[in-house]
Amino acid sequence: MITFLEGLLEEKQPGRVVINVGGVGYEAHVPLSSFDRLPPEGVKTRILIYHHITEVSQVLFGFSTAEERRMFILLLGVSGIGPKIAISALSGLSVRDLKTALIESDIKRLSSISGIGKKTAERIVVELRDKFSGGEAFETLAGTGGLPGDSRLRDAALALISLGYKQDDARKMIKVIRLEPATSVEDLVRMALTGG
């Protein structure tokens, strides 16, 4: 299996690149998020690869980050989702936005991606919602409801999960709490458990 390609970026078009590795040109399909991070043509680059093999073809898919490749592989694991839709999803939303939409069961946001209808979005949510660790699931909470770079919301949510609450329930309990500069993680957990 090919894990990455490192060489000169020969061609670059939205959705497609050609990397010259030792005189051999490898074509890889890339999401727009990875395409935007590529250097100009003629410059040495490295992209991570997912080598998709079927009975009739072999296709390379390239990614700028391991996180993008992981999300692509997770999407491929959903019944009815092929590489074309998975690339479209990563082109339509960032990995962080996709995770947020999955964790929050945001069917409307997922179905706004080209090629994903309401039923497919529902299936993606059902099959992938619980694939993320507690830390990943609450990574966005620290940035949206609290102070910049504040990890207290994530830590409080993780504490609730360790007490036996489901990720979705813990997220909802923490999200409604108003965060003040002096509020500790213990205060957040106590407020979540008492409802205020």
Image: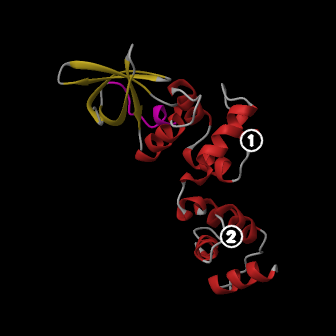
Tag 2: residue type? Answer: Gly
Q: Residue furthest right?
A: 196
Is residue 25 in view?
yes
Q: Is residue 1 left or right of residue 89?
A: left
Judged left or right of residue 76, residue 124 is: right
Q: CA distance from mark 2 to mark 1?
A: 25 Å
For residue 62, above or below residue 147: above
Q: Is residue 32 above or below residue 127?
A: above
How does the figure colour the protein chain or chains? secondary structure
Secondary structure predominantly adopted by residues drawn in magenta: loop
Camera-side residue: 20 or 171?
Answer: 171
| Label 2: element kind | loop
Mark 1: give few (<14), some (14-19) or many (20+) Cα within 10 Å.
many
Q: From this viewpoint, is residue 145 visible?
A: no
- Residue in the foreground of this view, choosing between 182 and 119: 119
Residue 86 % position (x, y)? 54, 32
Residue at image location 60% in from the left, 49% down from the top: 99
Residue 130 coordinates in the image, percent (x, y): 59, 54
Badge 1 element: helix
Tell me if 54 is positioned left or right of 137 in this view: left
Magenta-colored stretch includes residue 37:
yes
Foreground pick, 56 / 18: 56
Mark 2 or 1 closer to N-term? Answer: 1
Look at 40% across and 20% down and name the residue there: 54
Find disc 1 in the rendering and name its residue. 107
Closer mark to the observer between disc 2 and disc 1: 1
Q: Position of residue 51 (x, y in %)?
A: 35, 29
Outermost residue, left direction?
22
What residue type is disc 1 on? Answer: Ile
For mark 2, what is the residue? 146
Q: Which residues are magenta?
A: 33-41
